[in-house]
Amino acid sequence: MEIMKAKVTKYLFMLIVVVSIFMVNVGRPLASSDYVNYFGIEMTNDEYDTLLNLGFTDDEIMYMDERTFEENKDLDATLVATTHKYLKITYPMYGASYVTELTEQQFYEQTNGQMVAPLGEVYTQWIHEVTTISQNGSKYRYKNSVSWTSLPTERYYDVIGIGFVSSVAIDSSVYFNYVYMKADGTYTSSTLYYNKKSTSTGGTTTYKLPTTMYSLSANIYFDVVKNTTDTLTQLYFCGDYAHALSSVTSSQAANHAIGSGGIGFDPSVYYYFNQIPCADTYASVNW
């Protein structure tokens, strides 16, 4: 009997170890093991690090689709600049909404627990924006990621963009993706958009917010090449986002320009959008 108990104990221990290893390797990168994301895409640690160097966040890698993974996993990338912007959008009972920039500590203190609008406010939203510049072989990559910590009540057409000065030019497609959680707790990754712009001073994507969602994040990125014979010692871009406050059509939302100052709407639709300040992103280079 004692021998049987010992064998059972041994097998139970082995089973616990196997299950524990499996759970650790799904959804969490380790230094010496592979990684499997939410959609079942297997990655080596080198591939995971490459994605980080291209500016993808841990959450974006977690919910990355296979096409994005295959297009980026083997690139020669080095992350050279990262900017975090923490924003609070306040909608008072009277008057126009306004945006306040917070420190990281203030942001997480205010978004910890139940996010109830203070007295005198209808509601409050919080946004975390991450912008990056990466060296991608002989090119550089500009990337802008926006995550809603509290979801917008208006679900119309928003615009995400990157604006820059004319010393560089876009040399790839304008890539766009957004991820949201559905009512059943599952996540959907989508590249559906209604308008893309690729101009001499930036790129944007106009997309429709899901009607029913319980989380939302979006990102846009592209590669740039030099557009001058001069040696560049600094790169700059403005990561920008515009949220529609009232019902707008896709064509109205697409009625905008993009440049180093961010997204600029036609006067006929300007007041339909709540634009957050530029996430100014700089990198020292010798290019």
Image (cartoon, rainbow, N blue to C red):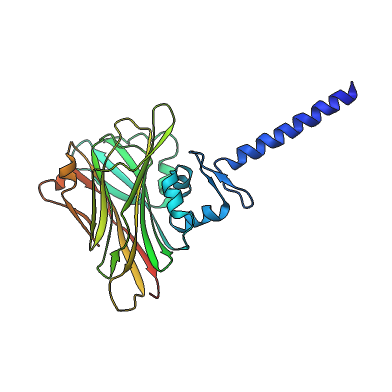
Q: Residue most toward the bottom?
A: 230
On the rendered structure, is 20 left or right of 77?
right
Residue 113: horizontal and vertical position, in percent? 44, 35
Q: Residue at x 66, y 34 (%)?
A: 19
Residue 51 placement (x, y as % from top left): 47, 54
User: Does 215 sit left or right of 90 as displayed?
Assistant: right
Q: Quadrant of the C terminus?
A: bottom left
Q: Image point 35% across, 32% down: which residue?
A: 213
Quarter of image, res 244: top left
Res 178 visible: yes
Front residue (pair 189, 159): 189
Residue 135 image offset from top left, x and y in percent = 42, 65
* Outermost residue toward the top in this view: 1
Q: Is residue 217 something that shows in the picture?
A: no
From this view, report whether residue 236 is shown above or below residue 231: above
Q: Residue furthest right?
A: 2
Q: Is residue 193 left or right of residue 150?
A: left
